[in-house]
Amino acid sequence: MKKRRWHALVPALFVLVTLAFVSPASALETEVTVGSNDHVFSQNKQNEPAIAVDHGRLARGQAPIVLAAGANDNIDMEGCNAGDDTTCPFTPNVGGTGIQFSFNGGMSWIQPTYTGWSARHCLGAPGGSDDPPSADACVVRQGPIGTLPRYDELGLVSDGDPALAFGPRPGPSGFSWANGSRLYVANLTSSVTADFRETPKPAFKGFEAIYVSRTDNVERAAAGDESAWFQPVRASRQSSATFADKEQIWADNAQSSRFFGNVYVCWADFRGGGAAPLVVARSTDGGGTWNQKQVSPAHNVAPKLFGQSGCTIRTDSTGVVYVFYEEFQNPLHPAVGFPPTATHYMVKSFDGGVSWTRPRAIEQIVDPCYFIDAVLARCVMDGIAGARSDLAAAPSVDIANGAPSGTDATNLIVRTWVDGRPAFNSESVMVSWSRTGGETWSAPVAIQDAGDRGFYSAPAVTPNGNRVYIVYNAFTTPFRTTTLTPRGLVGVVKQANANGGLTGWTTVHRGAIGDPRGSAQNNLVGEFLGDYVYAIATRTYGAAVWNEAREASDCPAMDVWRMAIRDADPADPPPPAPQPDGISPSGTCLGTFGNSDIWAWTNVP
């Protein structure tokens, strides 16, 4: 199991041990994904983080600061080169939505263990495990899991893309922070496979749905009590062709709002024939039931457009709901080219999600897609066989809505994204803001550190709008035309004073640089770091999570294979087999491969 690690940020000036250092706040970084086995691929594969803070505790005057985090997490998957290697690094019917908690503002993290369908016992060479050898040693079975519980009860599999939000708990007289807080976790969800379930009928129509998990007792949930969680509820309306994707969840958490307590989920609803509209579901009863509304046209994906995705959803202090998303263009279309332009859109609801305005174009941006990897058929930024950058230019947004009371809200809206301007290998982390409900916006400002090539970014605004935090992942090396050369990935947190305008951006944290070649997508043919990072803020506190490769192990044999398959030779050999430590026959990745993680920065008051 992973050891919890943290590294204090050392002040630039300090006195020796004879004098005490006094600071109004301490800043540190920690590993969030503390439960998985560092030495087994793909159990050591985590990416795509999200985080939420419980504003209700502030409303009730309770301490300490409570955080919840989620990630795509392979903690319960089989070890590669164990069982059926064609499933590496995913094991069918095993969940992939990890969950973690912090009860000290992010200074340390807990990843609870529940019971569900698991393959984490499946280690070593084919047929091997941590149990005595047997014919079914690597069969998925009930066992320990570090992912969301109770999905197996409904014939479901949690598939990642987590999104989290705290809201007020409903009571006999409606929603109130006095009733307590409710944590919502939305994620992609599939039905178990036909040969696995007891009956041939799937749990729902289509390929992927959006389900929402809920708990009213994070202490019990963090202690591994799965009864602290309600059974998951489906938020998406499904057809046989539906693939719901890239969701985000938000709970209206300002008491001043007319729709305080409402919960909203947005996602891209990919349908048969290429239609891909944005959809929003709302719940007025604490996530028990959901009503769905399409909020954008169903543009076709091809030939000129790639579709609409990358939504962010938020509410202001009066209850106005905002959804932001990106409409993509296809760089392979002769009328588009590299890099393609894209458009940020906004839709709003003034009646708690019942009806929505027509989509309003905010501005055109430059998608940082200068290269499509022929094997991946996706845009990549760090190099051949690199990590996909599909949603790098998607808008990530936060609003100063005055939570938990709403009384001192400024309703400042801050939007960030990664932009392809000014040039290849100079991709920028951009920030723009609005104090007019999104009707007008400031000119975008690039804020990345020198030498950084922005990858994903996210904002957090203090509820009173005084300060803004931006977290981003960035590549520190130029585009690589070979997989044989080291690459760099870093996590960075910046902040600015928002009084009168976002000025004076300073770097408050810069993490360790790691090599993203130690990450892998589902079929091993390229890297994988997910599609987003995340940040939160209270009036006195900020926290952020990002994809981390500082402890990821590159595999030379994997690098050679990834490069070789791009010559389109049908005689290419199968990929090298990632092996647990101590099991390293020739032709494999010797020692540990992988170990991508989620790390967090916190500024504890």
Image (tube, rainbow, N blue to C red):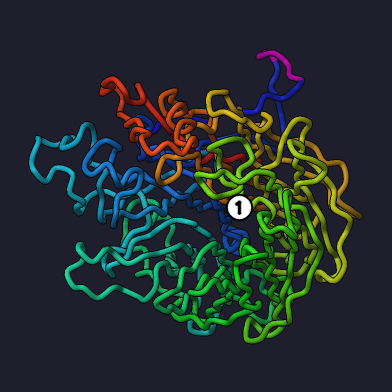
Residue drawn where x is 23% and y is 66% of the image:
194
| Residue 596 in sight | yes
Residue 70 locus on image (x, y percent): 48, 52
Locate the N terminus and report the quarter of the image it occupies.
top left
Q: Which residues are magenta?
A: 13-18
Residue drawn where x is 71% and y is 58% of the image:
334
Relative to 50, say whether 449 is above or below.
Answer: above
* Residue 262 colored in magenta in the image: no
Relative to 403, say whether 79 is above or below.
Answer: above
Task: Characterize the magenta stretch by its predominant secondary structure.
Answer: loop
Name the residue beneath numbered marker 1: 390
Helix or strand or loop: what does disc 1 sit on? loop
Residue drawn where x is 61% and y is 60% of the image:
55
Residue 521 locus on image (x, y percent): 45, 44
Residue 210 locus on image (x, y percent): 46, 69
Residue 311 locus on image (x, y percent): 63, 64
